[in-house]
Image (tube, rainbow, N blue to C red):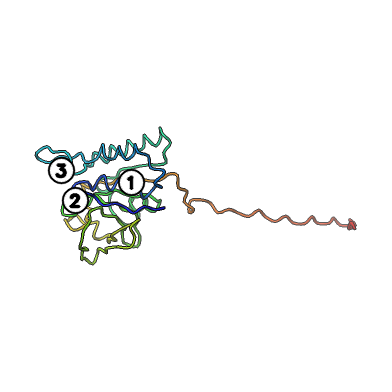
Amino acid sequence: MPIPLSYQVSEYDCGPTSLLNALNYLFDRKQIRPCLLKAVYQYSLDDCDQQGRPGYMGTSGAALKFLCRWMNSYAQSCHFPIRCKTLHSKDIFLGPGSELNKALEQGAVAVTRCLLGCGHYVLIVGAHNGVCELWDPYYEEKPIRKKTIETVTDEPNRCNHRVAYVQMNTENRGYYSLGPIPSRECLLLWNTGLKRDAEKPPKQKPAAKKPAEKKQGQAAMV
């Protein structure tokens, strides 16, 4: 049974919450192992503020890179069906032919850094027809009123916002902007145990056998 995606419980844990939402979205609850949850909390919330307090600047891009390597190693050594890849800077944009769009079409989800007043992580689960579907873990009582952003209230297992590509691809400080190109960060995750029907070649029916032709002059058997 699908489980609703989660909201962060503080001002800082958008990173680990989005990572756990990615696992929740990709895998059944019975498949998710405790060591995965432990690793997410152990290696995220690593960025410190000017007073040196860890976690007060949330989760760094370096933490995403480390978790990517850790999960790929874990998948190989413990036979868990996950694959991860990080994207950076100019490789992160939404549009036809982008690596992010191709990954989403292949069933991946993307823990992506964007802007929501400050640096913020969301989970992108789909992108098509110029619109991105995402789960923002920061709970807002009032919906964002903008033509390029739609608040979704009836899909708790998938998304709570639909955002136009043109809104996300900007470098300014608008809602859900991917921000300045050099600072863009994204972690792609796949469930490699899922077999997509589109990737399977269609089954062909065996050709019907033709009845044996009678040779000329051969009498029919009665």
Are the two marked residues, 2 and 1, in contact with CB atoms closer than 8 angstroms? no
Tell me what residue is drawn at x 41 percent, y 34 percent.
78
Q: Are marks 1 and 3 in contact (CB under 8 Å)?
A: no
Say if 66 sits above or below 145 in the image.
above
Q: Position of residue 177 (x, y in %)?
A: 21, 55
Q: Give the left or right position of residue 54, taking residue 200 as reference.
A: left
Check disc 2 and give the amino acid type: Pro
Badge 3 crowding class, 10 Å Cα cut-off, few under 14, some 14 to 19, many 20 or more, is some
Q: Residue at coordinates 24% horizontally, 40% vertically from top-left?
A: 44
**Residue at the image point whose x is 67% and y is 55% from the top:** 207
Please state which of residues 161 and 212 is positioned toward the viewer in this rendering: 161
Q: Residues within 10 Å of mark 2 (few under 14, many from 20)?
A: some
Q: Quadrant of the C terminus?
A: bottom right
Q: Identity of the amino acid at label 3?
A: Tyr
Residue denoted by label 2:
180
In front: label 3 or label 2: 3
Mark toward the start of the polypeptide (2 vs 1) = 2
**Residue highlighted by disc 1:** 188
Q: Nearer the viewer, mark 1 or mark 3?
A: 3
Residues 42 and 130: in front is 42
Q: Quadrant of residue 161?
A: bottom left
Which comes sooner in the sequence, label 1 or label 3? 3
User: On the rendered structure, is 30 left or right of 131?
Assistant: right
Q: On screen, 78 above or below 119? A: above
Compute the Cα span from label 2 to label 1. 20 Å
User: Could you say whether the residue bearing mark 2 is in a helix, strand or loop?
Assistant: loop
Per the image, the residue denoted by label 3 is: 56
Distance between the Cα atoms at labels 3 and 2?
22 Å
Q: Position of residue 134 (x, y in %)?
A: 30, 56
